[in-house]
Every structure is written in C-alpha cells, then in structure tokens.
Amino acid sequence: MAGAIDARLQELGIELPEAAAPAANYVPYVVSGNQVFVAGQITIHDGEIQYVGKLGRDYGVEEGQAAARLCALNIIAQVKAACGGDLDRVVRCVRLGGFVNSTADFTDQPEVINGASNLMVEVFGDKGKHSRAAVSAASLPRGVAVEVDAVFEIS
Amino acid sequence: MAGAIDARLQELGIELPEAAAPAANYVPYVVSGNQVFVAGQITIHDGEIQYVGKLGRDYGVEEGQAAARLCALNIIAQVKAACGGDLDRVVRCVRLGGFVNSTADFTDQPEVINGASNLMVEVFGDKGKHSRAAVSAASLPRGVAVEVDAVFEIS
Amino acid sequence: MAGAIDARLQELGIELPEAAAPAANYVPYVVSGNQVFVAGQITIHDGEIQYVGKLGRDYGVEEGQAAARLCALNIIAQVKAACGGDLDRVVRCVRLGGFVNSTADFTDQPEVINGASNLMVEVFGDKGKHSRAAVSAASLPRGVAVEVDAVFEIS
C-alpha cells in the first residue's frame, strides 16, 4: 500500500534508483535519534556512474542541475531505506551539503545545487525545504560533477 | 525589551544585518528538535555582495577575517530569526563550517575563519565556543571569499 | 580500570595521541544533547604536523590513507575527552566529513578516507560504521593532506 509520498513520486513520474550498497567501512545512512545522516551521494544511476567532469569546463549549469538532481534521487532512495520503506515518516529535509566539482572561477554553485533542492520540494512539499551549503570541491570521487549529502528528520 | 545578547551586541556596536531571504527552494535555517541548522552564509551586507576574490591572490588574511566576520554576522541574524527574535534562547554555537575561496597553496584557513569564531565568542561568551572545520573551496557562490554555515542549539 | 574499547585499542596496539588543545576561539568538540561534534582534525601527532602536501602530486593513496588514519586517531582522542575518558559510552560514529588536499584531477578520495573509516570499525566494531562525505579541498590548514571532522552519538 503506497503512502502519500510514494503516490507523489508516481505522479511526478519519478522512479527511485536502487539504494546503493556501502562501498567500504561506511554505510549509506545512520539514524541518530530522529535524525538520518545520509552519506554523500554521487551521480550513480543503478550502478552506472554518470556526469564525470567539471562545471565551468565540461558541463554547463543545466547539466550540473541534472547531476545534482540525480544525487538527490539517490538521497531519497537512502532515506526511504532508513524509514523502512515508508517515506511518509519524513518530517523534514533538514540540510543538504552540495559539492560541485568545478574550475577555480566557477560561481554558479547555487544554480547547480538547485537541481537537488528543487527535487526535495517537488517530492516533499514544505517538508522538503532545507538549509544547505553549496561550495566547489577541487575534485570529487571518480571525477563526478556533483556530490550531495543530507540530514533528514524522521518520525 | 532587549535581552542580554541584544545588549551585548549594542555594547559591541554591532548592528545585525537583515536576515537574507531564501534564494531558492531552500531556506536560511531549519529548526530540528533544539538544533538550528543555518544555511551557508556568504559575504552579503544588506543585499550587497562584498569580498569577491580569492585568498592567496586577491586578499590577505586580515581581509579574509573581515569577510568571515561578515558571514558570521549573517549567521547570527538568521539564528535571531530562528529564535523568534530572542537571542537569549541560544544555548550553544555547536559548529561552524568555514569554506575559504583560495589558491591551491593557501594554508591560513584557520586564521581566516577566526574572523567568524571570534565574533561568536564576542557576542555569546562561552556559549559561543564551537567546534568547526576550516577548509578551502575551489570556488564559492558569486566568487565570494568566504562561506560559513552553522549548527546552533537553542532552548 | 580500562573499558572494552580501551582494551580493544590496546589489543590493536593503538596508543591515542594527546587530545590537541583548542587553537583559537573554537574548541575541539561540543556536546549537544547526546551528539558530540568534533572539530576538523588534521595530521598532527603529539604536536608535530605530518603529511604536508597534496594527493595526486606529493602523496599516493597509501600515504593518504595513513594521513586519514592519523586524523581519525585524533578524532577518537577528542571523543574520549568528550566522554570523560570512557570510550564505552560511544553509541555510534554517526558521520565523518573527509577533506582531501588534492590536485584538480584526483579521483580516489574514497580510498584515502577509508584510512579513517577503517580505523573506526577496527576500534568500535559495528558502532564504528558511519555515514560520510569524501571530497577534495583546494587546500587545507598548514598544507596538510587530509582533514576529517565527525559527529558521534554517546550515552
């Protein structure tokens, strides 16, 4: 029986990717009290790495937004796992930490990370409105264009 | 009726800037339990972006400290909004995350971010003593020199 | 009387470094509720800075892992101080934030930060399994190769 957020995902035509398995001695999320700390998610879709390159050189803002949206999809998949499958337990997306792999003179980090921020509000409505930081990293794992981590509050 | 922290701000001759409005589908702060997560604040003063450039090339440590202090002023303005205007509800500045827009060989991130750290202790005393990370970003939104985010505990 | 984790440290032949003193108006850790926020720890061992240089230029992955492990040792030393000396109070390593000082084309951040992640699981077992982010910084304080901060849950 699908919940309200599952119905919303279907309405948006969004299919969540598989929640990626842990790559090492870390795990994709940890629940501490009623907070879920989600590990940095990169631009992987069902096991395939996408968007390898730098903003300001290889990708423009629109492609960066699509990359950030993909990270956000992976975050939601992890939160769903953290909630035992029931996304209606999400009380709030508390924080997103957005890292953009860019050249040294790139200045549109906010626009790129909006790709993740917008998805949160599309899916969770007001509960998806979060605090965030958006900065450039000198480089990112596997050379991907964007990495986003998150803190959620769940009930 | 001003509280103790408001009186302290006045004593220090510090006027808080306007709490900047949300720029997108994110918000300047989220309250989760008794923690306030403040979004990354940049060097904006009353709507005007300041300190655009890199440490190690365009700015020296003292200018970097002034930039970090401006970010911290914006953080306090957001925390005040999160407290419904009453900064006496601040229990602790828990964490600052400081990002310095710098060249690849800049090594004085701690001194720069002290501009934010020092303001917290000037204003909040022992309650202003926080954990922090201070690192360089490859670049920052709008090209600003410093971005700082924060976690506070409030009552 | 040593606790279980102290015994585990001894079994592993690990001697914790001195918990480094605060360098400024910030402190090495803040306890908020049952969470400990540990400030970014760098590659200092008993007051001596080590591993000054960049991954992808000065250091290979194995040296980077050793640098990350040293940061993690300093984190555990701070958590021990936060627990009043009793590491058995650790409920969970909730999150590690790993920053790698690297060239712009370095892509093995996960392998480097595994040096910290692995130590957490060696010492704390399943309680050491954490969420994390691993990104490159344009540069780091004092030019060190790795900085890691952390959130722990304690009882």
Image (tube, coloured by chain):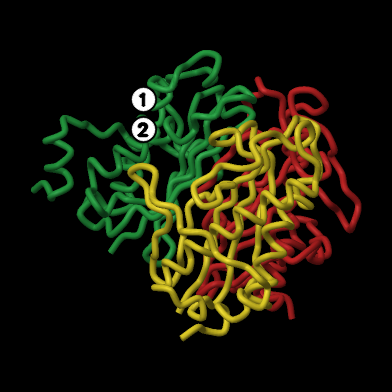
Chain colours: A red, B green, C yellow
Relative to B12, residue B64 above or below: above
Residue shown at the point (64%, 53%) measured from the top left: A149
Assign the C terminus of chain C to one quadrant of the image: bottom left
Residue B68, position in %: x, y?
Answer: 40, 31
C152 left or right of A9 in image:
left
Task: Please give the residue where the numbered disc 2 appears in the rendered image.
Answer: B115
Q: Are marks 1 and 2 in contact (CB under 8 Å)?
A: yes
Viewer-closest of B120 and C108: C108
Chain where mark 2 sits: B
Amino acid carrying label 2: it is Gly
C107 or C78: which is nearer to us? C78
Identity of the residue drawn at 74% across and 60% down: A11
Is the residue B4 above or below the residue B50 in the image? Answer: below
Q: Position of residue A95 (x, y in %)?
A: 54, 53
Choose the circle earlier in sequence order: 1 or 2: 1
Out of C44 and C26, give the one closest to the viewer. Answer: C44
Residue at horizontal 55%, vertical 71%?
A154
Q: Which residue is denoted by mark 1 in the rendering?
A: B66
Position of B117 compared to B16: left or right? right
